[in-house]
Image (cartoon, coloured by chain):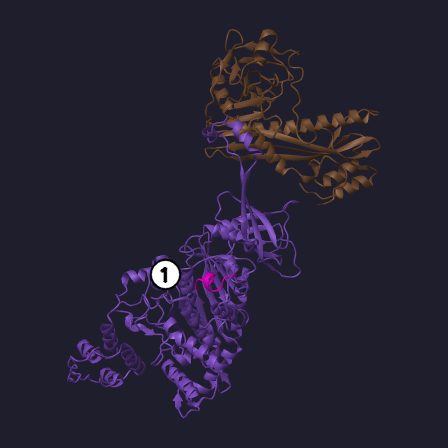
Amino acid sequence: MIRKTDETPIGRVVATELKPATPHQFHFWTATETSIGIGAIVKVLGPGAGDLGSGRIVYGVVTDGFAYSDLVTPLHDVIGAEGDPARAAESPTERPEIRLWTAAVLRQIPEEPLQPVPLGAVHVATDADVAAALRMDAYLNTAQPTAIPVGLYESGGLEAPVYLDADFLLGPEAAHLNISGVSGLATKTSAVEFLLSSIFHHYPAHRGSVAALCFNVKGPDLLFLDQPGAADDSDRRRYARLGIAPGPFERVRYFAPFKADGVNLNTLRTHPDLAQSVEPLVWGLTEVLDFAEVLLNRDDIDAKADAFIDFLGDRVVRREFADGFGGEHRVETFADLERLFRSIFDGLELAGRGDIWRTHHIATIRKVRNRLGNVSTRCKGLVTDDGPASDLPWGRFEDRGVYVIDVANVDPLGQDLVFARVVSKLREHLERRDLGVDAVVVFVDELNKYAPADGADTYVKKMLLDISERGRYLGLVLFGAEQFRSQVHRRVVGNAGTQVFGRMDSDELATPGYQVLSPATKIKLATLPVGELMVRHPHFTQPIFVRFPRPPVLRGRDGVERFPPAVDLLFADAVALQLVRLDARVRTNQVKDLIAGHEEMDVRRALAAVRRERPADALAMFRKRLGVRVASEPARERSPVQPLGPIAEEPY
Amino acid sequence: MNRGRGWLDGLYASGVTPASFLPDASLGHRHEPDEGAASSGVEVEIVEDAELRVHPVVASTAPDGMSFLDGIQQWKVIGYDRVQPIALAYVAAAVRRRDSGRRLATAAWAARQLVIAPTQVLDEGRRATLEEAGLEAVPVEVEAGTQPAQALEALRREVHRARAGLERQLGERAAGGLGPGDWLVVDGQVAVSATLAKHPRSIGVIKSHGAQFLTGRHLERALTIPAEHRTSGFRVRGGHGRTEVDSWYLRLWPWEGRDLHYGLIRVETARDDGRGTRAAELSGWLLAERAPLAAPDARFDRLLYPIHDVESYLRSRAPHHLMASPASRLPRTGT
């Protein structure tokens, strides 16, 4: 519904020599009781403007407010009240007050020639005015609109939708979104969840398909995106106004590495009702080898070691390979690689051919063996020595799908590996246009930790910089969140076309990055209520405050209350449970009997194979993969050796 | 009030030398002293007590529906016909009313823009030019050969008369429209208007004390009353005001350490045979009007804030070209 212009002005532009109206700023006064506040959008009609004229129309957003009376010095008030504050309120006459507002120009019509704001009447903005003021008409009312609702501009009873331009949010014109705010009050995660929902509803068909990949880096934040959240009438009204059907995401897949035991998933989404929807994230040698440099110390990777790792990757792994000593190898796992290393060392020793194998020095080979051999130990649960990998559905990403990778409880090295590999794979597939979708939003929280302005260059930071700087051409879009924007790498935040701010810390607002904001805007940011955000977008010439409804999904902490995580199971029970999930006919006791006496490593390998292949008869395949248990034979009784008899004559 | 410059150009084209001169006190109105009242047939009768006494006053809340009347005058010399000055004047008056909200709102306003000059200067052609522009041409009788300074004084008196006339006119109209419980407070004497002087709910507040109605020990007692005290009521007949009124002195602020007249006002009301009962009540109301302080007006010790508010209102509506220039008359740099 488009509201027509309210003919009654609510203020009037004033200009003095000290406070002149300029092309970018103006001042106006209103009645003491007014609906205008910081962040309100107003319209100035210059002489001749409106339906009957062709004068200048100026849209502005209120950035500061002043109130004062005719009191010259506070001392006059003291004298008038004879030093008694109670008497000051009893004076028969109230001094006249002024409400003087400063507004920053959002848009002038006509745009050329750019002139100072006329001293005209000030009106509150309507829906249509908001669209015009924010230049949203360029992408909202076109044949192929690219508008994505980000929230509602609310002022004086008006609720006008505010839209972002998909071309500037998800590329290719600009891309990336960064959201800042204090923990707990800024509702950063909620805002991103809402925005993803909005994107999924409004991303235009002619722009292709879109998916989201979210790294859950703390607690249960993103673990219940498939569960409906609480919504009240005001939320439902806002959703209706924004044209979004409130509801949880329909296509969500969760991935989490195992814990060190290799069978319990390292996630808080382990409630029996939900656990089956979490898929293990397990990588083997082939997945990890390309990212060996992530896992190895910089000092470890000299040119020689790097060359040898490349050799392994290019010539050995997943190929039939002859070691030169008569051995044939097919290396697919760390265990296979270890066998190859042993073969090389034994061969060199037996052949006496010195210290060089295939131009690589044995010391280099030993060093690489040592470092790679430790990887599965250091990333236990994520990297497996043996057995098949379980990975994201590369090449089969679904439109409007959400892929959550829970790395909240993974150690930093494992997180490095996950970020590096996932982002690299996304980039590879998007470059080849075979990911399954045309664009992917990657959401990473805690950028203060993963892309700090100072500190060491980690692979996570490199990956985030890579997305920020080159992602928009590929459709690889970073939605980043952090508490202190000033302490995030400037190229990460600088490349974000859309900046969102929740409630901010006062100390953070005192940093140079916020100097462009007026003191009043800073105060508003420091006291912003939950559910309200300040948005900067390439089409908006000034920051705009918007309200968004609660996200349509269950919040993390509500989720763990409703679905408390299950306690870790014993090894045998965990294996049985996983098989039961694959095939309901499987009985726990059968599984326990089967695995009794087997090495845990063998059980994990068999389980992984069943999980990957998902056969009709899970137990049969598990039994087959597990192999026959070799019964131990009792040791034969041996006749004891009789002791020598004493030799009496023996003198010793 | 913006009539453009056409008439001014026409005036200059007719032989008037352009000028821009703000005579002293041309931007406000300084009340004419209550000239000659004490010495020209004024009769004073103490009506409240046997002799003039001093009474303590307790501040009290005035009723809703209080109106306040004041006026301003601004003028400047805009040209000379040979040596005779021609002045552009602006006079305005307003009534601002206070209801239960403690805020003042304008109830009545009137203004006049005049061109005042010696009669011989304002010939028919010039008058026609002014009248076409909607200005009032006001000739002032000045004898030929009069010094320009004396002519200026005659113009000033005419401006004063115009302002006082407008105030009186607006005050009488406002008094006529007062409701049963409403009051009108006038900045100055009510005695100058028979209507006001006879209205039972009009109050005149006089800040200047050029005229003295008392003599001897009565005068000494009146001028030395302490703060929050008043004199007995006395009745004034004759003099500058032609209508009999009751009056008394009221001290708003302590004068010790300052000036004899500091914080001292004289109050005029219509004759009342209640023998002082109204003086006590009205003094309480006026005493309460000390707050808020009318600063930064230099007369804040005697100027009631609502009257100050009326002046501020009138100044905000006054034409800009009559406002004071900064201290220097050098051209401004524009920054």
Instruction: Spot the residue most to the bottom.
Output: A326
Q: Is residue A135 above or below residue A644?
A: above
Q: Which quadrant of the figure contains the N terminus of chain A?
A: bottom left
Q: Which quadrant of the figure contains the C terminus of chain A?
A: bottom left
Left or right of B302? Residue A483 is: left
| Residue at mark 1: chain | A
Q: Is residue A457 above or below residue A370?
A: above
Q: Quadrant of residue A638?
A: bottom left
Q: Quadrant of residue A370?
A: bottom left
**Image coordinates for residue A418, horizontal then vertical, percent:** 42, 72
**Chain B tint in image:** brown
| Depth check, front residue: B129 or A54 | A54
**Image coordinates for residue A515, horizontal then vertical, percent:** 57, 53
Residue at image x 55%, y 14%? B225
Q: At numbered mark 1, what does the secondary structure look like: helix, strand or loop? A: helix
Amino acid under label 1? Arg
Q: Is residue A452 magenta?
A: yes
**Chain A tint in image:** purple
Residue A85 seen in render? yes
**Image coordinates for residue A572, horizontal then vertical, percent:** 23, 74
**Image coordinates for residue A256, horizontal then vertical, percent:** 35, 71
| Depth check, front residue: A159 or A516 | A516
Left or right of A77? Residue B33 is: right
Q: Over which residues does the magenta segment extend? A: A445-454
Residue annotated with mark 1? A236
Q: Is residue B92 above or below residue A585?
A: above
Left or right of A214? Residue A129 is: right
Left or right of A226? Residue A646 is: left
Q: Is residue B41 above or below residue A495?
A: above
Residue at image x 56%, y 34%? A71
